[in-house]
Image (spheres, rainbow, N blue to C red):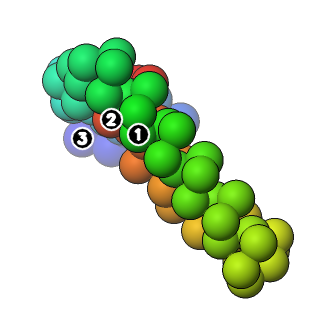
Amino acid sequence: MHLPTRTRRILAGVFLAAALAPAASAQADAPQGVCDTRLDRVEAQFYDMADRRGYEEASAWWQARWQAYHTSCVV
């Protein structure tokens, strides 16, 4: 059976959302106090790195760290 491209994309999106929904809710179960501490540490590390290596390098580092924090504490 040949489905049009639009239909295949819609179905792929639905399956992806269904697969990721349980995983996202399971990751966001970290206690709020732990998340607050992690955020404070990440921010402090960013400012230290910006002082030592410059804002551009610290910003590149921040992107990866923020994604990890966001995945485990915000989502």
The amino acid marked with disc number 1 is Arg
Residue 2 in percent (x, y) is at: 33, 44
Secondary-structure class at tag 2: helix
Say which label, 2 or 3, has the lower sequence index.
3
Secondary-structure class at tag 1: helix
Q: Is residue 35 depicted above or below 56 in this figure?
A: above
Is 51 or 68 nearer to us in this picture? 51
The amino acid marked with disc number 3 is Met
Is 40 or 31 nearer to us in this picture? 40
Residue 20 in percent (x, y) is at: 27, 31
The alpha-carbon separation of the residues under discs 1 and 3 comes to 50 Å
Q: Give the residue displayed 65% in from the left and 71% down from the top.
A: 49
Residue 1 in percent (x, y) is at: 24, 41
Left or right: where does residue 47 sit relative to residue 37?
Answer: right
Residue 68: mark in rendering: none
Secondary-structure class at tag 3: loop
Say which label, 1 or 3, has the lower sequence index.
3
Q: Residues within 10 Å of mark 2 (few under 14, many from 20)?
A: some
Residue 64 in percent (x, y) is at: 51, 60
Q: Residue furthest right?
A: 55
Residue 38: mark in rendering: 1
The alpha-carbon separation of the residues under discs 2 and 1 comes to 10 Å
> What residue sits right under mark 2 in the picture?
72
Q: Is residue 50 visible?
A: yes
The amino acid marked with disc number 2 is Ser
Q: Give the residue displayed 59% in from the left and 68% down from the top.
A: 61
